[in-house]
Amino acid sequence: MPELSEVRRDHFMRAAIGCFARYGYRRTSMDVIAQAADVSRPALYQYYRNKEDVFRDAVRWGLDDLARRAQIEAGKPGETSERLAAVLSVVVDLHLPRRDGARFDAELIDETRSRAGDHWTAFEQTMVEALLTVLGRPLDDLARVLFYGAKGIAVQLDDRDEALRLLGRLTSFAVHGAPGLR
């Protein structure tokens, strides 16, 4: 198969992610992806054998982008709890509805785990490493609790502002402890 240029791959991946988020894995076809990418179906097949290949590449492309964003946030200066919240806001953004109403919902999470679990595992590990960068010491359990806590907040809420507020509270509790408890 011919090699995709970065620009063309980005174009295909944006179209594919939009389709998978909007219609789900099962209802997305190569025709739908090709239409969204404004190419013919045969043109898409030049680069991908089937829908699962497109899906796996889209998952990797999207999660790699989010992981890069998290790593950038981890490297910025600031208070620990605010930096943790900034890293974890990436998880919130992954799960919240997009402007077009599409979202990374339970069906896509299940499909990602079954069809591209290796990419999801690598993403989770990168997120934990970004959190450990902020924490500055080996607190793997705390980093994992924060990651999964952010994921839980994101999955339960459709309001980004409220999700970020709760995320701020979670990271503050993790760093400073809950007020009144001791």
Image (cartoon, grey):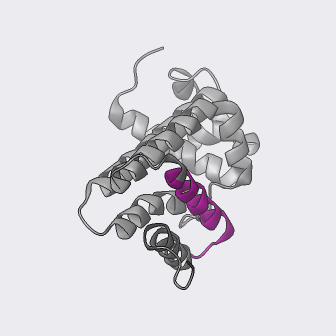
Number of numbered discs visible in the structure rendering? 0
14 left or right of 29? left
Q: Give the residue at x 58% y 64%.
A: 96
Q: Residue at x 47, y 60 (%)?
A: 88
Residue occupying the far bottom of the picture: 180
Residue nearest the observer in this picture, 61 or 13: 61
Q: Is residue 34 above or below residue 74?
A: above
Q: Position of residue 102 (x, y in %)?
A: 62, 60
Furthest residue to the front? 182
Image position, residue 43 (x, y; %): 52, 26
Say which residue appears at 60% left-offset and 26% top-offset: 53
- Looking at the image, the residue that sits furthest to the top is 1
**Where on the picture, by quarter, is residue 97?**
bottom right
Q: Residue at x 68, y 38 (%)?
A: 113
Seen in the picture, residue 35 relative to 163 is either above or below; the reply is above
Q: Residue 114 vs residue 14: left or right? A: right
Q: Position of residue 95 (x, y in %)?
A: 59, 59
The secondary structure that most of the magenta stretch takes on is helix
Residue 26 x %, y %: 76, 41
Q: Does residue 43 sit above or below 35 in this rendering?
A: above
Tell me if residue 59 can be seen. Answer: yes
Residue 38 seen in render: no
Check if residue 4 falls in the magenta segment. no
Magenta part of the chain: 142-159
The C terminus lies in which quarter of the figure?
A: bottom right
- Front residue of this view, candidates 68 and 75: 75
Please name whichever residue, 162 or 34, is drawn nearer the observer in this view of the structure.
162
* Magenta stretch: includes residue 150: yes
